Amino acid sequence: MYSEVLETMDGGREFMGKRKVTILCSGFGLGFYIPGLLAASEFGKRDIKAEVLVFESFLEHDKREHIADSRTAYHSNFALANISARMPMDIRNSIDYAQVELLLETWKAEERYEFISLSGHWIYILDLYREKMLPNPIHVDLLYVDSDLAPSWKSLKKFHPRYDEHYYNACLYDTDKMAIRYEIPVLPGTTLPFESRKRRLVVHGGGWGMGTYQSTIPELASHNYGLDIVAYDWKEAKPDPDHRYWMNDPEWCSWVKSANGLHEFPPYIEIAGEDTNSYTAEADHHWLYDIASEAMAIVAKPGAGTLIDSLASETPLILLEPFGSHELSNLELWESLGFGIRYEKWREMDFSVDILKEMHQAIKNRPGERTNYVDHYCSRVALTKS
């Protein structure tokens, strides 16, 4: 395991330019993208520059083009998505190595030494850079935003068993103790008290609109809850006076930089009645967080981003069928902590509001110091100019 504390990265040589942390995300799911942007924002608050990059930008063009096909297939067939999650994939066959070499030369010229990776796919590229920079060490945090290894990490482990030998494993959750180690905050300030929240539920299928969320809508609507439903595409949006439909702007793509050359939070669309309203991206958080913060619960599969939203907004989860073993682990963690309840069990309780309030209070009164992951990072990795 790589040393947890780096006083200076090269034994005392003065650094050129300002410290910058490179945050390496993936567009496969927003749970491996949004947390990276949130972390970048936290570094900015500490006057530390951060750049977010997305792995899919460095795939061969034809491989990148097939992602949209996979997304559509997994949205339509959740069983197929779960089968795919169990199939190891050697991503090295899809990387555009000419583009990667240009990236590594840029990093070297800028003397990049600090990296945080939210996806196992990046490790092959980081290994190339580590070799290029020898004998000077680089520091890499492997940031696990799920409570068990997501598919990119499991594939990496199969083809590269000692992948973490030179890097630091940073886990948000401790499944042995069923506890939260570190948190990624979304917005500062106190959350809305439960009594002030609307009798509404947020219903979604994660960044790719996967899972059983659509099948819950008629039953939830019949129990006097207003619904905020995240649609995957236009044809899903069937608003009525009690429900609102939202969606990420379908023209937006996580691995395509915005006009200002940055990866940003997605712009979004609200569909209410006959009205359609388009909104620009929020500057510092994902738009869905604001809606979740006013709701009594989030009805969704337990993806990494959904856990972060639940914790930060103190909004309990109604847990739907998970995607892969990593989300099953997330489900069991949230259930154990009292922060969530399985949909079927909540149905047995006749969709009780009281249990939602109890779970909200459990999140609000959670034990521990609520350590910000970025604070934890900064306490371990201390770059100083000589």
Image (cartoon, rainbow, N blue to C red):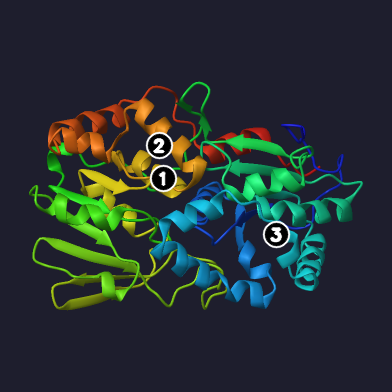
Side (left or right) of 298 relative to 129: left
- Quarter of the image with the N terminus is top right
Q: Is residue 242 visible?
A: yes
Report which quarter residue 349 is drawn in: top left
Dot label at residue 91 = 3
> Where does residue 119 sit, x and y in percent of width and height?
62, 51
Mark earlier in primary sequence (1, 3): 3
Observer-nearest of 136 and 163: 163
Vertical placement of 78 versus 169: above or below? below
Q: Is residue 34 visible to us here?
A: no
Q: Which mark is residue 186?
A: none
Q: Is disc 3 placed on a helix, strand or loop?
A: helix
Upstream in sequence: badge 3 or badge 2? 3
Q: Earlier in the sequence, mark 1 or mark 2?
A: 1
Quadrant of the drawing holding the C terminus: top right
Residue under label 2: 331
Relative to residue 319, is residue 380 drawn left or right?
Answer: right
Q: For the point 66% across and 33% down, which residue is it?
A: 380
Q: In this picture, is 225 found above or below 76?
A: above
- In screen coordinates, is 294 left or right of 134? left
Marks 1 and 2 in Cβ contact (< 8 Å): yes
